[in-house]
Amino acid sequence: MNLHPHAREDRAHLTAGRGALTVSGLDKSFDIGGKPRKILDSIDLDVRPGEFVSIVGASGCGKSTLLRLIAGLDTDYSGELRLDGDRIATTSLDRGVVFQDHRLFPWMTLEQNVELALLNTDTPKSRRAQIVADHIALVNLKGFEKAYPHQLSGGMAQRAAIARALVTEPKLLLLDEPLGALDALTRVHVQNELQRIWMAQRSTMVMVTHDVEEALYLGDRVIIMSPNPGRIRRIVEVDLPHPRDRRSPLLHRLKDEILAELTGGADDANAADNLIHLPNREARS
Amino acid sequence: MKNALSRSSVRLAIGLVAPLLLILWWQSQASGATATFAPPAAIASALAELLRSGDLVRDTLATLQRAFTGLTIGAPLGVAAGIAMGIWKPVDRLLGPLLHALRQVPMIGWLPLIGLWFGVGEGTELIVVSMSTFFPSMLNSHAGVAQVERRYVEVGGIYCFTTLQRIRFILLPAAMPLVLTGITQALAFAWISTIGSELLTGAGSGLGVAMQTAQVQQRLDVMLVVISVTAVLGFLINQLFRRLRQSLLRWQPAQP
């Protein structure tokens, strides 16, 4: 396994403590009906410290599985998965996660939820209240500290979840379709906030999304994945400074390109798979 | 606040309609006390007599003490056992079958056996009451922990919770609604089994003992007083606990 120890040590030294993610030769299979089925097939990806990377792809391409592996929620994989040179073998306070469902504990107030994330950090107790208040203010939820999750709207709860994920100051923030459950208007609003937060914090972020526009608006790069088994199909550089203008022609051109890639551009073998064969009717045509 | 007050007093008034009608009907049927019938007026005078002699207070306190002592022994053990079985599968496999078989026996069914072992008296009654509160607490707590959603447990994983932290901050609060449902049931069971075992063993003082004595003395009016006190007290205790439950679960969205 340890083929190039020197090379890796050099790289680890270069990026130590800054949130550099290295994925190389990553394979992941699930057991389905007793047979192993490949979900991720030799994924290679380097995410630079402070970079915002979006991952898009059809459902079933393994993008959420990839995120769960990086989070350390699933440790059954082969290949390399490293954050700042350290192999990912479990969850860690270095990696924050925001899910599609906010997953705030319903039995705690917003404030208690955010503070609970600090439970196992070495943040001194005396400073915790201030840090929690700062992060609640960061996501514009001042005044709702004592609210229970069921008293918050969907967008507010999702922002609270982002505050909870950021309060530990993770080197890497993983976002698994974080805005997928929100209505279109709230979505745009939280996208703007996410961009503002990322620009303020500059921690590394990896976001999985269904929404190509969202991927382009936020991402420095957009990773396009294809299913069966999940592979990286293409990587699109979005060479625009932040904060971005949604009306930018480049974003629109890239969006059309990526949509074409995701819907029409399948190679012949895959295209044939996608046709529906109705055996009895084939003879007629 | 005022609005809520008036609404709850209206609800109280509506709740009193049926009992009052029952008493009125009863009185209208009455011509005089016989061995099998006592009009409400006779019951009222029996109540006054029992209050004056202090018997009723003594019996009520004895029963309350017995029921709550049994509850404070049985319910915590039941909650602890249920939670342990919910968290650790081996504990469930080890104890589950035994406990599920044992709970099929009605609590009163244990009385002869336990009476044989421990003699007729305080100890036997306490054991029966504790056992009757143990099972509903255990079953509901077990179900409560078993149904905690994985997604919340995962959040604990992300923040590197220890096992104890997971139990304290996720499993216990998530299971709390069902744990409290179990304790509510245990409360009712404690009340029923206390009166029941007092009736059957008939030792010392207690509402059940008073019932039995009244039966022997053919005092129907006394019997009815004791039954009414039992019903009203049981109802009040249950209401009190419902309040407590609501305040403990105020994080839940309002039930429609």
Image (cartoon, coloured by chain):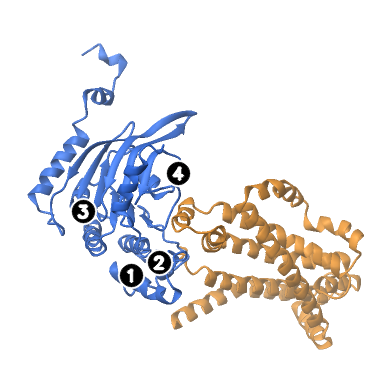
Chain colours: A blue, B orange
> Measured from the top left, where is residue A125 in percent x and y?
45, 74
Q: Earlier in the sequence, mark 4 or mark 2?
A: 4
| Residue hosting label 2 | A114
Nearer to us of marks 4 and 2 is: 4
Tell me which amino acid carries mark 1.
Ile
Which of discs 4 and 1 lies nearer the camera? The answer is: 4
Q: What residue does disc 3 label?
A: A218
Q: Which residue is mark 1?
A: A136
The residue beneath circle 4 is A75
**Dot 4, how many residues are within 10 Å of its Cα: few (below 14), some (14-19), or many (20+)?**
some
Image vertical order of residue A210 relative to residue A113, above or below: above
Instruction: Please state which amino acid type lies under the numbered disc 2.
Output: Val
The type of residue carrying mark 3 is: Leu
State the image coordinates of residue A270 (x, y, percent, origin top left): 26, 26
Residues tagged by mark 4 and mark 3 found on one chain of the structure? yes
Q: Position of residue A137 (x, y in %)?
A: 30, 71
- Kindly identify which chain the residue marked by label 1 belongs to: A
